[in-house]
Amino acid sequence: MTMSALEALLANPRIWRGPTTTAAPGTNHRPTGWQALDAALPRQGWPEAGLVEVLSAVDGLGELSLVLPVLAALSAEERPILVVAPPYRPYAPAWRRAGIRLTQLHVIQTAAQDALWAMEQALRAGCCGAVLGWPGAVDDRALRRLQVAADGGHTLGFVFRPLAAAGAPSPAPLRLCVEATPTGTAVRILKCRGSHPPAHGIPFGRTAH
Amino acid sequence: MLWAAIFLPQLALDGVLRRHPAPERPLALITGPRRHRTLFAVNAAAAAAGLRPGLGLPAAHALLPHFECHAHDPREETRLQQLLAAWAYRYSSLVCLEARDVVLLEVKASLGLFGPWPRFERRLREDLAELGFRHHVALAPTPLGACVLAIARDGALALDRPQLERALAPVPLAAARLSPADVQALGRMGVRRLRELHALPRAGLARRFGPALPQHLERLLGERVEPRECYRPPDRFTAHLEFNYEVEHHPPLWFPLKRMLGDLGTYLARRDGGVQRFALDLLHAGRAPTRLPIGLLAPSRDAAQLFELCRLRLEQVVLPAPVRGLRLTAHELPAFVPATRDLFASRTSELQAWSTLRERLRARLGDAALWQLQPHPDPRPEQACRVVLQLAREPPSLALPPRPAWLLATPIPWREEARQILAGPERIESGWWDGEDMRRDYYVIETRHGQRAWVFRPAGAADGPWMLHGWFA
């Protein structure tokens, strides 16, 4: 089926058509596993490649369970998942219960400088399904390098940072923040490519596993 | 049977020149006792300046003030001959070593696979040129006949006995591998070529020179068959290189290291195997060598990948003393099956295999930096998750109450108020057999900030102190 010139022009992702239109056909995305979040993201899921920044004020609000469903899907496809310098030790029974295959899960524990190098190498290699990192206090330049590596290697990278970094500009194309509201936890999209982020937070009802 | 002989006229000199970054400069091998050093072999540039083998070292310096000297090491010749035998093993299953500088291979069985002899010979010559050795190649029905033909004339060909006799006729006795005393005695008798020697009666030769000489002639023509010990590839690889100078920084080591790893790759390819663990020794003068063990998680034989790994690890090492030599030893050589790649893979061409990335990370960060998790059927939370270097198969899943995604290495006291208790108490009472027994009641609570934490208190105490053990992230 050939597209007319007008359709080809409108399918260009640089043209913004408002948040109510569905995503143009052919863009790749991965379902997040959370229906409300899927509906709010411009591409109905995580991008196929690039950095996704997840900000949270404290640990334990659910920032990791936000990404566990897509990690489970990737590990089921036999793609390696790399966790670089996590703040705590991943606890195998819980990750397996979330559906992640432990043969595909690899953990790197090293100093901060080497952790950034390892993340960049893994993102650029293109063989990993997803790379998770806790870069700590990094500046814009390091994040820009990670973003370029993720684009070049066509890999999905998740970067977890404190909420205090929400004010600083960041090169990641998708930024979310997980915060606690009086009614429970909610996910707010701070920045996304392709449309304006929704103004209100999305309730995030994680079960007690 | 048809035997091909490869004669290496300048084996020791080629062994030095092939690893030399500038082989066109004058170079000579030195031998002899310390008081009376003579030249053993010279390369083309030195020969053009007038140096010859056998010349004394002071006279050589008078002719050509500046040329590079290397000590001649007979063990290195043996090692090179073994390397070439390993290379020849690819083309034939019967490989023999003759004297110090001839490699024999039985080719009749291999002609069906490698084509007619001209094509096969061209392949042999191309390989030898790439390895960096000057060579003569000859073909004959007997091994000794082929050896003698190769020494006498490059490219000699004899497919059956009459052709062999015709080819051997003009060969001078000096090239026929007879003992020098016999050659001299026969020369005084006026016998200088093999055709004249064949014309003499065998019984007379046996009476004058002993039984060895007629037996040698019979072996030459195939009348006497001698069993030969064939080359068997050893199950280990060793490469050794000494420098004439001291190396204090890393960059001068890369070129010789790349050559050594190239030799290892060739050896593994001919053997159809891989290497999983090898050791690189840095030799110092007056000190024990510095050993650098290098291990991979899966066998490999890609020379470029091995060089990159060696380089990454070597750059982390601070040289404790100037380096005088390198030694590479590989004792464990498991079988190797290269990973298959999908021809129609939809990913981009910059894909590295996961194993390549893993080896690079381990080379730079250390072997213990990259690990996997293995669950263990132990009720105690600390023991339920073990760290392994590589997980062989997916562990079976167990049905467990809710567990946190993050576990703290050691529980810390938690003094805040819980807004709500979501689940619990779960009593874990276990571990009496190894001294780390515990009796704890675990709860899932929600804090004031909305976090979900896994805390415990000592069993039975209704208002004991809380300890934080994990986060439900």
Image: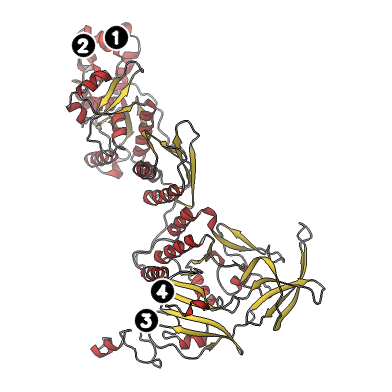
Q: Which residue is mark 4?
A: A50
- Residue B139: which numbered mark, if any? none
- Residue B205: which numbered mark, if any? 1
- The residue marked by circle 1 belongs to what chain? B
Q: Secondary structure at mark 2?
A: loop
Which sits in the foreground, A62 or B54? Answer: A62
Q: Which residue is mark 3?
A: A27
* Figure check: A206 above or below B49: below
Earlier residue among tags 2 and 1? 2
Q: Closer to the observer: label 4 or label 2?
A: 4
The residue carrying pointer 2 sits among few (fewer than 14), some (14 to 19) or many (20 or more) residues within 10 Å by Cα, namely some
* Figure check: A190 above or below B9: below
Q: Which residue is mark 2?
A: B191
Which sits in the foreground, B464 or B134? Answer: B464
Asked whether the viewer can see residue B2, the reply is no
Q: Position of residue B218 (x, y in %)?
A: 31, 19
